[in-house]
Image (cartoon, grey):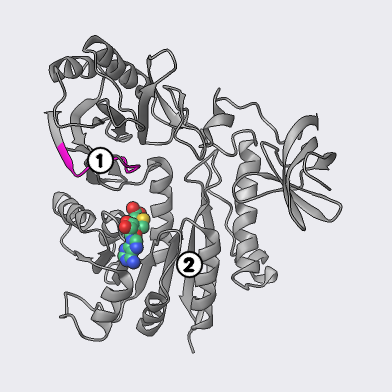
């Protein structure tokens, strides 16, 4: 096999990045744009010793899992890697990924994972309507060849803007917001920022919407401090139903980072409010907040179910962000202790606790792998409740999973239950293996589809201390 060779290929699987996988002459090929079940004519684009890359020259027989892409730029944008795969198959593929990682990386026996009685793998919690779930969007602005202002998304692995005003994963209001911003810019002769020259004013439009509250926030990220004739922008944006907050954020650095350090509210409230279940959260332009609120509510319900709280328990919530899970659990627990590395997030967590009248949630800034041992080894003063002997520990780490020191300290604390929320099944499986070797047994794993149309896989696991 050489580069540019043409050969028929059947797509048997899909890779973690969404590429189709097929085998030919003992080699594995990764094919972008090919869907599980497709029979294609492939053209080799890169050939290594036992694997290679190819592109679709022609679809000989389309897979029955193939569906028409609803978004006109699905292929160029790269945000929705799985849009051409039916939603039923997307869910099945995500379930299979979790199951395979548990067996292959976690070392759990297939008999355990698949057992019929007391089944470990729960069916994935999918969405009924698998579009328009994102409550946050960031659109870069730029110019096309004719010098017209465009907004859209960057093409995969580049900074070329593909014009689109209505991402089908986002809120329907995004389109009229972008139109209002561009109309204002045209009327006031304001140029979008140019990354190459460093000139121009408006860099990005950040839009956030509280899906439960209907409140909308727009933040313009600008290469400067002032917006000329800002009232004209305000007049346009405030015609949109739900508009509650208009902000500008200054970012004068010539870098890839989207937001600068300074944010100013120019109209309405500093933050918007949203609800997960019956708990209210304040969201400002910078704060971290789950992007799919529908599925987040279901994920947290699952966390609550797995935590199985009766009312008196002490619970750690490690990697707690703005305290969403902590506050959700606090209503049902004795004391909750949240740990998070970002100081602003902890400020938000404390404010959110106050706002909801929750007094049994305590928050600490720092690394989970430092704060937890500090408490356990007595380098920190005691707090309300029994923090050293928790009943439940919840973790929700970033993709790289938990630090080993964190896992070892959790094992020494011997909680009855550990609830592990994960956005990467591979590191989840690795960490569950460590915990299983430390005297815990895997009870349940439930994938929750937070990001339909994309390859992201979120799931939640329950493990329990083996009583000796
Ligand atoms: N549980 C929250 C946020 C989860 S995202 C929610 O459901 O909304 C993971 C969080 O872990 C991020 O907020 C990130 O800032 C934080 N984080 C990353 N590394 C950390 C560490 N070593 N110790 C504590 N928190 C960390």
**Mark 1 against mark 2, which lies toward the viewer?**
1
Looking at the image, the residue that sits furthest to the bottom is 468
Question: Depth check: 424 or 2 in front?
Answer: 2
308 with respect to 60 (left or right): left
Q: Residues within 10 Å of mark 2 (few under 14, many from 20)?
A: many
- Mark 1 close to ligand 1, CB under 8 Å: no
Quarter of the image holding residue 318? bottom left
287 with respect to 53 (left or right): left
Residue at the spot 55% in from the left edge and 22% down from the top edge: 72
What type of secondary structure mainly makes up the magenta span? loop
The x, y position of residue 228, in whole percent, is: 15, 20
Quarter of the image holding residue 305? bottom left
Looking at the image, the residue that sits furthest to the top is 187
In the picture, the disc for residue 462 is 2
Does 415 lie within the magenta span?
no
User: Can the viewer see residue 39?
Assistant: no
Residue at the spot 43% in from the left edge and 23% down from the top edge: 166
Label 1 belongs to which residue? 253
Q: Which residues are magenta?
A: 255-263
Q: Residues within 10 Å of mark 1 (few under 14, many from 20)?
A: few
Residue at the spot 51% in from the left edge and 65% down from the top edge: 427
Mark 2 secondary-structure assignment? strand
Residue at the spot 35% in from the left edge and 82% down from the top edge: 413
User: In terms of image quarters, where does ligand 1 lie?
Assistant: bottom left
Say whether marks 1 and 2 touch (CB < 8 Å): no
The x, y position of residue 425, in whole percent, is: 54, 60
């Amino acid at each position: 096999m050489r580069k540019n060779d043409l050969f028929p290929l059947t797509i048997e699987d899909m890779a973690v990045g969404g590429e189709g996988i097929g085998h030919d002459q003992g080699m594995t090929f990764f094919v972008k744009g090919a869907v599980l079940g497709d029979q294609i004519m492939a053209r080799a684009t890169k050939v290594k010793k036992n694997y290679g890359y190819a592109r679709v020259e022609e679809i000989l027989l389309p897979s029955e899992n193939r569906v028409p892409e609803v978004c006109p730029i699905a292929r160029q944008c790269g945000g929705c890697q799985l849009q051409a795969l039916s939603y039923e198959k997307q869910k099945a593929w995500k379930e299979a990924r979790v199951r395979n990682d548990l067996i292959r990386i976690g070392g759990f026996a297939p008999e355990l994972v698949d057992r019929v009685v007391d089944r470990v793998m729960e069916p994935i919690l999918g969405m009924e309507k698998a579009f328009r779930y994102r409550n946050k969007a960031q659109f870069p602005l730029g110019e096309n060849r004719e010098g017209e202002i465009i907004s859209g998304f960057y093409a995969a692995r580049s900074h070329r803007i593909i014009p689109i005003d209505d991402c089908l994963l986002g809120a329907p209001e995004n389109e009229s917001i972008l139109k209002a911003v561009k109309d204002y810019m045209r009327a006031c002769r304001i140029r979008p920022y140019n990354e190459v020259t460093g000139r121009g004013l408006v860099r990005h439009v950040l839009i956030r919407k509280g899906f439960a509250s209907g409140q909308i926030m727009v933040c313009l990220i600008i290469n400067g401090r002032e917006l000329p004739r800002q009232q004209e922008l305000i007049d346009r944006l405030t015609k949109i139903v739900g508009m509650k907050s208009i902000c500008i954020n200054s970012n004068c650095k010539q870098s890839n980072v989207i937001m600068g350090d300074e944010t100013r509210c120019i109209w309405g409230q500093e933050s918007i409010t949203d609800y997960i279940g019956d708990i209210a959260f304040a969201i400002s332009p910078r704060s971290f907040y789950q992007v799919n609120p529908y599925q987040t509510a279901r994920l947290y319900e699952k966390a609550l179910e797995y935590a199985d709280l009766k009312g008196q328990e002490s619970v750690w919530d490690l990697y707690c962000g703005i305290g969403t899970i902590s506050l959700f659990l606090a209503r049902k627990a004795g004391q909750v202790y949240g740990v998070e590395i970002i100081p602003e997030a902890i400020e938000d967590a404390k404010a959110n606790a106050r706002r909801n009248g929750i007094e049994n949630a305590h928050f600490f800034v720092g690394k989970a792998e430092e704060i937890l041992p500090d408490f356990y080894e007595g380098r920190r003063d005691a707090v309300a409740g029994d923090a050293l002997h928790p009943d439940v520990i919840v973790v929700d780490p970033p993709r790289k999973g938990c630090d080993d020191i964190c896992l070892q300290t959790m094992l020494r604390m011997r909680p009855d239950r550990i609830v592990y929320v994960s956005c990467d099944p591979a590191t989840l499986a690795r960490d569950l293996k460590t915990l299983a070797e430390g005297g815990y047994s895997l009870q349940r794993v439930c994938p929750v589809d937070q990001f339909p149309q994309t390859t992201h896989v979120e799931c939640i696991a329950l493990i329990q201390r083996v009583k000796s």
